[in-house]
Amino acid sequence: AQSVTQLGSHVSVSEGALVLLRCNYSSSVPPYLFWYVQYPNQGLQLLLKYTSAATLVKGINGFEAEFKKSETSFHLTKPSAHMSDAAEYFCAVSYGTASKLTFGTGTRLQVTL
Amino acid sequence: KAGVTQTPRYLIKTRGQQVTLSCSPISGHRSVSWYQQTPGQGLQFLFEYFSETQRNKGNFPGRFSGRQFSNSRSEMNVSTLELGDSALYLCASSAGLADPYEQYFGPGTRLTVT
């Protein structure tokens, strides 16, 4: 069965520091991978997606992720954290279409002054 | 373009009752998926409807059901509510074949079962 593992349920960074949120997937076939962000009392917003085109994917709000097949990873990065980035981030995987997403357990990002 | 809307936003029900949640997808979107989010189990896929037909189903008991209307609006029903059904229920829509890789989520319905 497909699954994703997010290492670290809580990550804290200083404003201006690098953000790195980790996601590993398990799959025997090429997956489609996604990162979503959830702000308090809101739904999920798509940050970026990998659908077998370029392995380095750029998303909204300055985030990007690199698909590494050899490491089965799809880590999310942002060069410089902003206070407004504080939220919960979910990595998700699907096969075929995105209509059935399997989510990781989420990583709560805290940004401090 | 209006986003995905869900009604109601908050709901309190008693054990044993049933509840119906509604989701209106983005105009033109034909696929609607439902997810349950709880602190213990995280985000779990319930089911997906496309052109009024259930296309995918997650691992939930038969108390959870859904349907989709000809205008793509979808409803989700939970019968005989249990305390463990307390959750945020999220609906997502996508364009289907036109762009199957991007799902747009609504704000969710927060269900509390007492």
Image (tube, coloured by chain):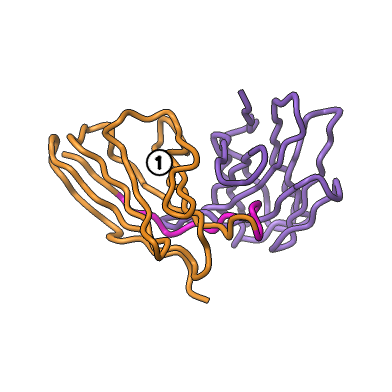
Chain colours: A purple, B orange
Tell me which corner region of the image, top left, top right, bottom left or bottom right, holds residue A59.
bottom right
Prevailing secondary structure class for the magenta stretch in the rendered image = loop
- Magenta-colored stretch includes residue B99: yes
Say few, some or many: other residues with alpha carbon within 10 Å of mark 1 (under 14 / 14 to 19 / 20 or more): many
> Is B12 displayed left or right of A83 in the figure?
left
Q: Position of residue B114 (x, y in %)?
A: 16, 39
- Does residue B84 sit above or below A81 in this rendering? above
Indicate the quadrant containing the N terminus of chain A: top left, top right, bottom left or bottom right: top right
- Magenta-colored stretch includes residue A37: no
> Is B113 displayed left or right of A2 in the figure?
left
Q: Which of A30 and A83 is in front in this view?
A: A30
Q: Where is residue B15 in the image (x, y as percent from the top left)?
A: 14, 36
> Is B45 displayed left or right of A32 in the figure?
left
Q: Where is residue A9 in the image (x, y as percent from the top left)?
A: 57, 34
- Does residue A29 sit above or below A84 in this rendering? above
Q: Residue at x 59, y 55 (%)?
A: B96
Q: Which of B19 and B54 is in front in this view?
A: B54
Q: Which of A102 and A43 is in front in this view?
A: A102
Which residue extends farthest bottom?
Answer: B1
Query: Which residue corresponds to mark 1?
Result: B36
Determine the chain carrying the residue at label 1.
Answer: B
Tell me which corner region of the image, top left, top right, bottom left or bottom right, holds residue A28.
top right
Q: Residue at x 56, y 57 (%)?
A: B94
- Does residue A106 sit above or below B110 in this rendering? above
Range covered by the magenta-colored residues: B98-110
Q: Residue at x 75, y 48 (%)?
A: A77
Label 1 SS: strand
Q: Where is residue A87 in the image (x, y as percent from the top left)?
A: 55, 52
Residue flagged by tag 1: what amino acid is it?
A: Gln
Q: Residue at x 40, y 65 (%)?
A: B71
